Each structure stands twice: as C-alpha cells, then as structure tokens.
Image (cartoon, grey):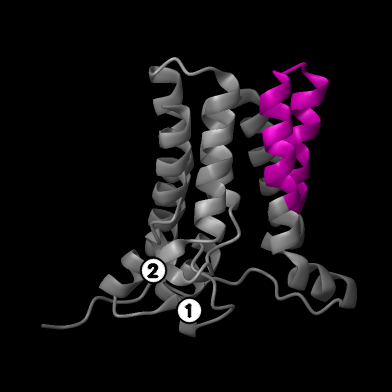
Amino acid sequence: MATLLILVAYLVGSIPTGLLLARRAGIDPRRSGSGNVGATNVARSAGVRIGLATLAGDATKGALPVVTARWLDLGESVAASAGVAAVIGHVAPIGLRFRGGKGVATALGALSVLAPGAAAACVAVFAAVAWRHRLVSLASILAAITAPAVLLVTGAPTGTTAAMAVVAALIVARHHENLRRLVAGTEPRLALPKERAAPKP
C-alpha cells in the first residue's frame, strides 16, 4: 500500500497545473519567460489570477498524498515520502518529458500537512525576502533551506526532517541557473504584468 501511494503521489505531482490553466487563456508558459510551468512564470505570462490558481493547485498536489497517507495510517515516514514523491512528480513530470517546475509550491503543500509550524516559518521567510528584494528565486531558495532547519531544531520526526532536506536540496538544485544570475547580479526582479483582459466575444 505504501509503495502504491508513493507511485500515485508521483503521478499526482506530475499533473501540469500551470500549463493546463494557462492554456485555457490561450497561453503556453513553456514558450514565455523562463519557460517554467510553475506559478511564478505562469503569473508573468498569463496574469496574476492564473498564477495564484496555479500556486493553489500545485500546493494541493503536495498536500493530498500526505493527507491520504495519514488517513490510511501508514506512518509519518510514508507520509513524508509521499510528499517527496509529489515534489519529484512536479519537478520531473512524466507527461512533459521530465521538464517541470521547481517544486516550491508543491513542497509547501506537503510541508503544510506534515509540519504546519515549519511551513509558516518558510512562508514568513519567503515573504520577507520577496518583499525586500523582489527576487522570487532567492526567496524560494532561502525558504526551502528553512524547512529542514526548523524541523531539526523543533525535534520533528527524523523521516520528516530527512524528507524535507531532500526536497530542499532538490529545490536548490533546480534553481542552479538562478543562482548563477544572482551571483552575477542579473537575476530579474519580480514585476508582474497587469491582469489580462478577457477577450471580447
């Protein structure tokens, strides 16, 4: 049952929420901006409303497998592993030739169920950095690193801490290009477009 749940978690994570929502507005985020199907690039290419919907959808992909694992009483290690599988599905979706998003929102969804306090700390770090520097990539990296640090300090279950350490490493790795631009001082700052007007009938 645990193995099946982890496989299903990967498949759920593989659902390209941002791509599906943006396509309804006639936009393919893979052909715009960074080419990423995550919430940030979707917001930049298709508008804030669709970007927020993508954020909610991606977070739900991370939360659902963890909730299911707990409902089935499979233990915290399996629940944490299901969360990791969902993040991997988002980052490397089988339906998009393993080219997905960066896993931040999906990781947040999983963490919100596993350890709500740690999730709140990550959101606070993200918000503070994004507000101060308007650099979503830097905010995402620091928030990801915050998760296992808070879990370790607060004495969370070892399996949960280890799982979030893996997720944090994956998120940082997925931001390798952003890291190079951050070092070079060329990383673009957050500047969302105005919401796109609905087409006239």
Give the mark, 2 or 1, whose residue is nearer the N terminus: 2
Q: Say whether residue 141 is left or right of residue 80.
A: right
Label 2–label 1 contact, CB within 8 A: yes
Q: Is residue 143 visible?
A: no
Relative height, residue 141 to residue 162 (above, below): below
Per the image, the residue denoted by label 1 is: 30
Q: Which of 155 and 121 is in front in this view?
A: 155
Check residue 156 for magenta coloring.
yes
Q: Nearer the viewer, residue 128 or 27?
A: 27
The amino acid type, in three-letter code, at marker 1 is Arg
The amino acid type, in three-letter code, at marker 2 is Leu
Q: Quadrant of the C terminus?
A: bottom left
Q: Which residue lies furthest to the right in this view?
A: 183
Q: How crowded is mark 2: few (under 14 residues within 10 Å), some or many (20 or more)?
A: many
Image position, residue 195 (x, y; %): 39, 71
Image position, residue 85 (x, y; %): 54, 44
Secondary element under disc 1, as helix, strand or loop, is: helix
Question: Marks 2/1: CA distance?
Answer: 8 Å
Secondary element under disc 2, as helix, strand or loop, is: helix
Q: Is residue 64 visible?
A: yes
Residue at x-position 72% and y-position 46%: 168
Residue at x-position 24% and y-position 76%: 198
Image position, residue 80 (x, y; %): 58, 30
Residue at x-position 48% and y-position 18%: 74
Image position, residue 192 (x, y; %): 53, 71
Relative height, residue 76 to residue 124 (above, below): above
Region rendered in magenta: 140-169
Residue at x-position 49% and y-position 68%: 37
Quarter of the figure with residue 189: bottom right
Q: How crowded is mark 1: few (under 14 residues within 10 Å), some or many (20 or more)?
A: some
Q: In which quarter of the image is the N terminus?
A: top left
Per the image, the residue denoted by label 2 is: 19
